[in-house]
Amino acid sequence: MPEFNRFEEVVTLIVKHRVKAGFEVPYEAWLRHIVGVAGQSEGHLGVDVIRGKSGGLDMFTCVLRFCSTEAMQRWLDSPQRQALVNEATPMLADGDQTEVNPVNEFWFAPQAEAGSPPPRWKQAVVTLLVILPHTLLVPLIWGPLLQLNAFLSNYIVATFLITLTIVLSVVYLFMPMATRLFAPWLSHSIANR
């Protein structure tokens, strides 16, 4: 049960950096270093880096997940992060831009110069592509196990277990993967709306 409570508290830190022209290579080396340091921070659950362009400059959006607001705040306030951000500041066009939100609000984070999320119909298509296989396969996978026990085969219990499996796998695994996979298509739609 404590593990499930940990998932309920997940918060996401979004860090956006526009890199000055000519600093792309040193910035990428710095980024690899800070991602490694952040990964050792207590309560850190993972990071995704999304590359794009903004105003003609390389834009890096880092999506860091933490088990709680407190863990995220410890990382934000840590002397290590402060020192690393100070080291990167000369390479950044707009400084260190941070946002905080629940993890699922950034499945479709704006990535293009337009600064707005993709059209809802494209979000719906990607979401359907993730959810549909889950609703077809997860009940088939759970089916034999649920029939082994009368309590587990109860409609409410079975529905809860199937739904929980779908929600956790979609939120923590498949939706982040799908949005990375479809990022060019999603961001292309932003620029051409």
Image (tube, rainbow, N blue to C red):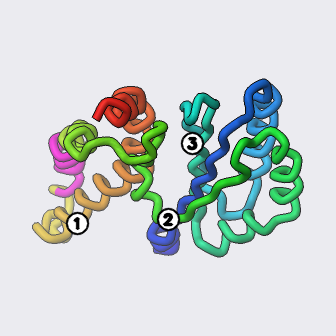
Please give left or right for residue 138 compared with residue 20 in the image: left
- Name the element at disc 1: helix
Image coordinates of residue 190 in percent, x first then y, are 35, 36
Q: Earlier in the sequence, mark 3 or mark 2?
A: 3
Image coordinates of residue 167 in percent, x first then y, are 31, 56
Circle 1 residue: 160
- Name the element at disc 2: strand
Where is 8 relative to 143, above or below? Answer: below
Which one is closest to the eye, mark 3 or mark 1?
3
Residue 49 appears anywhere in the view: yes
What residue span does the magenta drawing correspond to? 135-146
Image coordinates of residue 100 in percent, x first then y, are 55, 64
Report crowding for label 1: few under 14, some 14 to 19, many 20 or more residues within 10 A (C-alpha): few
Circle 3 residue: 48
Q: Circles 3 and 1: CB distance less than 8 Å?
A: no
* Quarter where residue 67 is shown: bottom right
Secondary structure that dominates the magenta span: helix
Depth check: give the residue in front, 143 or 77.
77
Q: Which residue corresponds to the image point at 66% horizontal and 63% vertical from the top-left? A: 43
- Amino acid type of the residue tagged 2 in the rendering: Asn
Which one is closest to the eye, mark 1 or mark 2?
2
